[in-house]
Image (tube, grey):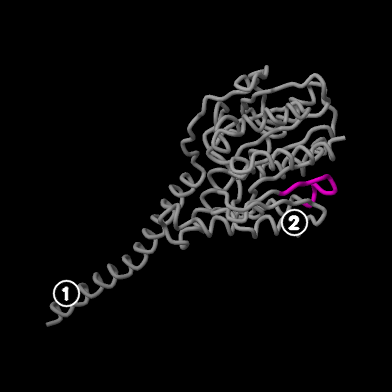
Amino acid sequence: MKKNASKGGNGSKTLKQRVITALIFIPLLLFFIYLVIGVYAAGEVTKIGDHNQYRDTPASYGLEYQDVRFTARGDETKIAAWYIPNDESSKAVILIHGRDASKQNAISGKIVEFGAALHEAGFSVLMIDLRGHGESEGERYSFGVYERRDVLGAVDFLLKQGLNPGDIGVYGLSMGGGAAIGAAADEPAIGMLVLDSTFADLNPLIEEQWENESGLPKFFLPGVFLMNRLIYGYDLTAVQPVEEIVEVAPRPILIIHCRTDELMSMWHPQTLIEAVPSAKSSFFDACEHAEIYREYPNEYQDLVVAFLNENLE
């Protein structure tokens, strides 16, 4: 009887150990899976998508240009650009495309036409490929965190061409606007900003688009933020151009947005304007995200050229 009781006790003890082991192992396994998904999703969030290249170059508009390379300020990333000098002007504009685009294909390929129009209006123009896009080095984007270095490298290039501090304007489209704000906050040589379809805060944008773009519930977002910080070295939740744009003022700022933008609601330009009340703004209707110029080329050119002429002294 005692022997049988002993066996029963051992059996109970073994079952108890298994339950305890399961209670410890299963949460650890689930947490590990959660982190693995976070690693994968962080990679997907910053993965550069395909972007078709169009055939237009500045030469398509009868302009002589230089195919140049320079180094991003602060790291060794090589940035590709087209430089269209204007011998009759001491002013220059840097054009910055958005996510999954390039100096050639942004605005449905119309960005080259826009650059040519700015040159005709009397400015030297530098059209850059942000890191990982077009012909520039790099594999991922960072919503403007590291791309600001590309813009600062472009400023350094223009200063070496003889441009004076304050005579350089920066035009940023979508994510390029976030990079432009960060660069201008760091570099007083940037005399003014034109921001088209630019986000004020990445957090609500990610939350709004997360489930549609990833197919995952928002429950996974904290893991993505953690893994992105550990792997890529920056905090997605801290990407807030609205916090930096106040450092750009009182330099002139023009904010352009489409009221029917399907990606970025009017909350974004309104939030930027609230942060910098001195900024000028212009809103358009019946257009898609970062495609305002495509729909309203003449009005858009007149708006931007007038702002540049007024503020690049």
Q: How many marks?
A: 2
| Picture quadrant where residue 66 is located | top right
- Magenta range is 246-255
Give 301 or 3, whichever is nearer the viewer. 301
Q: Earlier in the sequence, mark 2 or mark 1?
A: 1
View extreme (right): residue: 313
Tag 2, which secondary structure? helix
122 lies left or right of 25: right
Which mark, by number, is residue 273?
2
On screen, residue 24 above or below 260: below
- Residue 220 coordinates in the image, percent (x, y): 46, 59
- Residue 105 coordinates in the image, percent (x, y): 55, 33
Q: Is residue 312 visible?
A: yes
Name the chief secondary structure element in magenta.
Answer: loop
> Residue at coordinates 47% horizontally, 61% vertically from top-left?
218
Give 57 or 3, whichever is nearer the viewer. 57
Q: For the residues carrying marks 2 and 1, which lies nearer the camera in this image?
A: 2
Spatial CA span between label 2 and label 1 = 77 Å
> Residue at coordinates 43% horizontally, 47% vertically from top-left?
40
Q: Quadrant of the N terminus?
A: bottom left
Structural crowding at the residue carrying mark 2, measured as other residues with C-alpha within 10 Å and reported as few (<14), some (14–19) or many (≥20): many
What's the residue type where badge 2 is placed? Ile
On screen, residue 291 above or below 276: above
> Residue at coordinates 38% horizontally, 64% vertically from top-left?
27
On screen, residue 289 above or below 163: below
Q: Quadrant of the C terminus?
A: top right
Dot 1 corresponds to which residue? 7
Tag 1, which secondary structure? helix
| Picture quadrant where residue 269 is located | bottom right
255 lies left or right of 141: right
On screen, residue 46 above or below 118: below
